Amino acid sequence: MKLKPGLRRKRLAEEQAEKRRVEKERKKQEEASRARAAAAAAEVDRKRQEKEKAAAEAEAQRKRKQQAKQTEQAEAEKERTSSVSPFHCQI
């Protein structure tokens, strides 16, 4: 059955409108997907930076403790050597 020219144009216009609607929805979903991926990447980057910062802080704290221990040992050694009586060396 053949459609009348007016109905044919109407159906063609409806089909084109549907195609535009579907394409618009697809683009909207793609954009939402890109936004989710960007947010996930930003979260991964933030967590990585937090881990790096924590590791750097732990390393700095370890170095401070090591430096304090070395200073304490040096002071103890100095105290030990300075507490020797001058008469001890004279025989």
Image: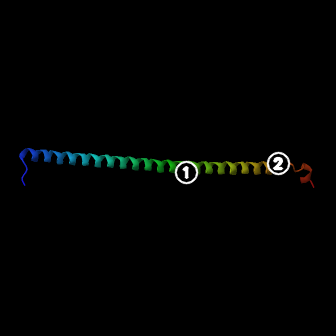
* Left or right position of 87 against 65: right
Distance between the alpha carbons at the discs numbered 2 and 1: 42 Å
Residue ID at (76%, 49%): 72
**Residue 29 in picture, x, y percent from top left:** 33, 48
Q: Within 10 Å of the Cα at label 1, are there few (<14), some (14-19), or many (20+) other Cα atoms? A: few
Q: Which residue is mark 2?
A: 79
Q: Label 1: which residue?
A: 51
In the image, what residue type sits under mark 2? Answer: Glu
Helix, strand or loop at disc 2? helix
- Residue nearest the viewer, comparing 79 with 91: 79
7 vs 84, left or right, is left
* Residue at x-position 54% and y-position 48%: 50
SS for dot 1? helix
Q: Quadrant of the C terminus?
A: bottom right
In the image shown, does 51 or 29 lie closer to the viewer?
29
Cβ atoms at labels 2 and 1 below 8 Å apart: no
Answer with left or right where residue 68 lies relative to residue 5: right
Residue 20 percent location from the top left of the image:
22, 46
Tell which of 50 and 31 is nearer to you.
31
- The kind of residue tagged 1 is Lys
| Front residue (pair 77, 53) | 53
The number of discs equals 2
Q: How is the image coloured?
A: rainbow
Q: Which mark is residue 13?
A: none
Q: Residue at x 91, y 53 (%)?
A: 88
Q: Of discs 2 and 1, which sits in the foreground?
A: 1
Image location of residue 31, percent across then percent down: 33, 46
For marks 2 and 1, the one nearer the N-term is 1
Crowd rating for badge 2 (residues with CA inside 10 Å; few <14, some 14–19, many 20+) = few
> Which residue occupies 36% across, 47% down?
32
Outermost residue, front side: 1
